Amino acid sequence: MNTLTATDTLTLEPPAPAGDDRLAAIARGGQFDAVVHPAVDREDATLEVRDFCLWYGPKKALHHIGMRIPRGKVTALIGPSGCGKSTLLRSVNRINDLLDTVRIEGDMLLNGDSIYAPGVDVIELRKRMGMVFQKPNPFPMSVYENVVYPRRIDGERSRAALAEVCERSLRRAALWDEVKDRLQESAMSLSGGQQQRLCIARAIAAEPEVLLMDEPCSALDPIATNKIENLIDELRGRYTILIVTHNMQQASRTSDYTAFMYLGHLVEYGPTADLFRKPRLRETEDYITGRFG
Amino acid sequence: MMIHLHKEIENLKKRLLSLCAVVEDNLRQSVQAITERDDRRAEQVIGRDLEIDQAEIEVEEECLKILALYQPVAIDLRFLVAVLKMNNDLERIGDLAVNIAQRAIFLNRELPIEVPFDLNGLSEKTQTMFRLSLDALVNLDASLARKVCAMDDEVDAINRAMYDGVKAMIRRQPEHLDALIALLSISRYLERIADHATNIAEDVLYTVQGAIVRHAREFKRLPPEDAPPASVRRD
């Protein structure tokens, strides 16, 4: 027991975990135990990912992912580039099917219905989900036609019904006040942030069972980002949202649950407040505090 | 890698350890001012308190700056919150050392009397607790921090016994009333320093384990030494 001096060093590294380092084990392709907090299991799940694996050609990009996505909550997928978070998100609406080299094992269930069972009508399946991409992708048509598009292709012809869908969706997307007098203008004339909220309005016009967001703010400035984050908060409860984000602070601000992925594996999954205060795993702590990745 | 944040935290640690060193030295000097009847030491202690107060403000400003600029999470956040709290404890220990030094100066004007309780034992235990709490901080050592928390009961017991000893002595030697009351105050100051050392140890436990252990006995929710993962799935 020595008297302290100002030159003593103080290490912030927590004690090394017993046994093998999990990330090294993953990198070696070894067995790996994901840690899922019990709070996740107590939630009612809209989407259930079951022992899901995915290959791009010979490369295995997702390894036995098991996740329940809670109903009405915002779940964020975080992890370094190449960890598989976008691949997992795109597997939910089977966009990956468009690539010939993709092969999968396992399944996902949307409200109990298999997503990957043989004979599933992918078009009908995708109608049950909304997708928002990194870059806003409004269709080259009017603001109004963009929003009502999913209802039109679903056979809705009533002008009154479509007008009601348009207003309700734009209000929920916090865009109504800004575009209510410009509904017939081209969607391309809107700002980037407005275009992204328009895409969210279009996604929710179809009343999706799950809303998938792939880095929805990465092409936006801080003010537009703030509006999207506020919008996500507004949508919480009404929609189940699964969001991929590179921005850790965005994950901590917007999500109820966070899943940390690494090299195609789920590492730790639990309530965001717990994960960002005291994650169970040293590996998660190292990633979210910027000590690696 | 969040290099800027980690550099800022390193600088904060240096400031904190420097504050710890001054407070620890002031506490030791204040006790020696009593045992050696040394006014000079006591005056030094009182003079250096301004340095401690200044350092406390600097540490707090650093913490607030880091929180505002970097929004740290997980262990970085827990460490910063713990530093904010222990900074306060360190400043209070500094003030209590000044109180002890002031009583030492008073006692040095009085005739030497027999101390009716184990003053040396109490001061040694308190200083040991404080040193151990700082060692626990430096090494982020949870088991050492738990040891400090357990020692607080021993200090409380000596402090309780002290009351009976002082009361009996006042009855026997009422002419030394003022000196005995000064000793009573010193005992109380030492006991409060032990409480602050316990707070520091509890903040170390929070930093390492992420669990708030304060009042745990009252709530009967002492955390297990190593909480196992909630559920582990085999992929």
Image: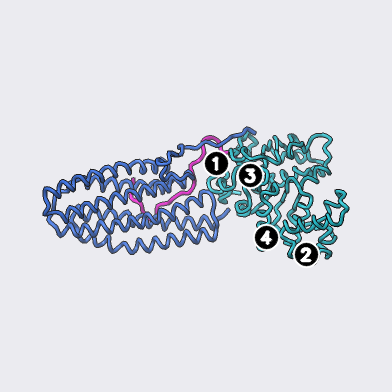
User: Do pointers 1 and 4 mark residues of a single chain?
Assistant: yes
- Is B166 placed above or below A227 here? above
Sequence-first disc among 3 and 4: 4
| Mark 1 secondary-structure assignment | loop
Q: Residues within 10 Å of mark 2 (few under 14, many from 20)?
A: some
Which residue in the structure is indicated by mark 2?
Answer: A180
Residue B63 is situated, as x and y percent measured from the top left of the image, at 47, 58
What's the residue type where badge 2 is placed?
Answer: Lys
Q: CA distance from mark 1 to mark 4?
A: 32 Å
Which residue in the structure is indicated by mark 3?
Answer: A259
Tag of residue B3: none
Tag of residue A227: 4
Q: CA distance from mark 3 to mark 4?
A: 24 Å
Query: The chain drawn cyan is chain what?
Result: A
Tag of residue A280: 1
User: Left or right of A15: which side holds B200?
Assistant: left
Q: Nearer the viewer, residue A110 or B30?
A: A110
Q: Quadrant of the N terminus of chain A?
A: top left
| Mark 3 secondary-structure assignment | strand
Q: Confirm or deny contact between disc 2 and disc 1 (CB under 8 A).
A: no
What's the residue type where badge 4 is placed?
Answer: Lys
What's the residue type where badge 1 is placed?
Answer: Arg
Residue A138 is situated, as x and y percent measured from the top left of the image, at 80, 58
